[in-house]
Amino acid sequence: MSTITRTWHNLRRIGLKEYARQMMYIGDTKAGTYIATDRYGNKYYENQDEELPRQDGSQIEPGWHAWMSYLVDKPPTEDPILRTGQRSWELPEHRENLTASRAAYKTYST
């Protein structure tokens, strides 16, 4: 939930059309500088004025998690080490951690 001041500031920055779209889809207003899009279509923005909420690291790719956690200064699209792409030992499809969900692995008792 945002404050009225933050909402008014974001409305002025992003415009009425984008404000209405964000309120319809996410129920809050966000403003920032577009950084890049990962291979799954997630868009990443940077806004130094606001603190990010805690993010579950298993729901995003490792390079983006390192950037969002301030472990590296540059996003994966600009960092030469993170830009190497997929390594031979990495899984081809990123899977999030399913612990504490209905899809979690359950042991079989014999």
Image (tube, helix red, strand yellow):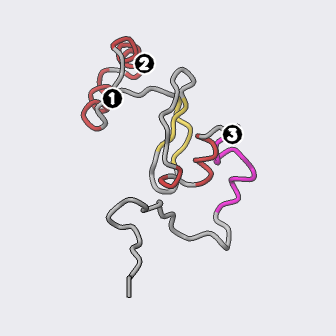
CA gap between label 1 and label 3 equals: 27 Å
Mark identifier at residue 74: 3
Query: Which of these two is toward me, 97 or 19?
Result: 97
Residue 28 versus residue 95 in the image, above or below: above
Left-right relation of 14 to 24? right
Sequence order check: which comes first, mark 3 or mark 2? 2
What is the three-letter code of the residue carrying label 3? Lys
Residue under the point 51% across and 56% down: 39
Circle 3: element type: loop
* Residue 86 magenta-highlighted: no
Looking at the rendered structure, the number of numbered marks drawn on it comes to: 3
- Extreme residue in the top direction: 5
Q: State whether the magenta stretch is mostly helix, strand or loop.
A: loop
CA gap between label 3 and label 2 equals: 24 Å
Left-right relation of 82 to 49? right
Residue 38 versus residue 17 in the image, above or below: below
To which residue does mark 1 refer? 28
Sequence order check: which comes first, mark 1 or mark 3? 1
Q: Residue 2, image x and y in percent?
A: 36, 22
Circle 1: element type: loop
What is the three-letter code of the residue carrying label 2? Arg
To which residue does mark 2 refer? 13
Q: Residue 44, image x and y in percent?
A: 51, 40
- Extreme residue in the right direction: 80
Q: Residues within 10 Å of mark 3 (few under 14, many from 20)?
A: some
Query: Which of these two is toward me, 6 or 43?
Result: 6
Part of the protein shown in magenta: 73-85
What is the three-letter code of the residue carrying label 1? Asp
Q: Residue 6, image x and y in percent?
A: 40, 16
Left-right relation of 98 to 49? left
